Amino acid sequence: MTKKVLTIDDTKTLRMALAMTLKEAGHEVVEAVDGKHGLEVYDQESPDVIITDLNMPGTGGIEFVRECRSMPDCFCVPIILLTK
């Protein structure tokens, strides 16, 4: 089953690696460069799953999760936190 996956990371190479792997597995990928951008993309794209970096400048992963979870439609969306 194809899922729409939102990846959020300030490192372009990691976003590219995630996108390549997820697309090869048959998923649709949308990307964001930080938590603030991630909230905007989430609102526009309504992804099924979110993969976010923990440490990012500006709005980081924890802040993103807090803000996303405060939205009623995001409460049940799986979120995976990555860290280096």
Image (spheres, rainbow, N blue to C red):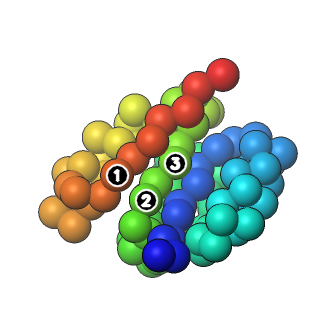
C-alpha gap between disc 1 and disc 2: 5 Å
* Mark 3 vs 1: CB contact within 8 A: no
Q: Which residue is mark 1?
A: 78
The quarter of the image holding the C terminus is: top right
Residue 19 coordinates in the image, percent (x, y): 71, 60
Residue 77 coordinates in the image, percent (x, y): 30, 58
Amino acid type, callout 1? Pro
Residue drawn at x 79%, y 54% is 16
Which residue in the rendered view is the most extreme toward the top? 84
* Mark 2 vs 3: CB contact within 8 A: yes
Looking at the image, residue 64 sits to the left or right of residue 25; the answer is: left
Residue at disc 1, secondary structure: loop
Which residue in the rendered view is the most extreme toward the right? 13
Q: Is residue 16 visible?
A: yes
With respect to residue 17, does 25 lie above or below? below
Q: Which residue is mark 3?
A: 51
Mark 3 Cα within 10 Å, few/some/many (few <14, many 20+)?
some
**Mark number, residue 49:** 2
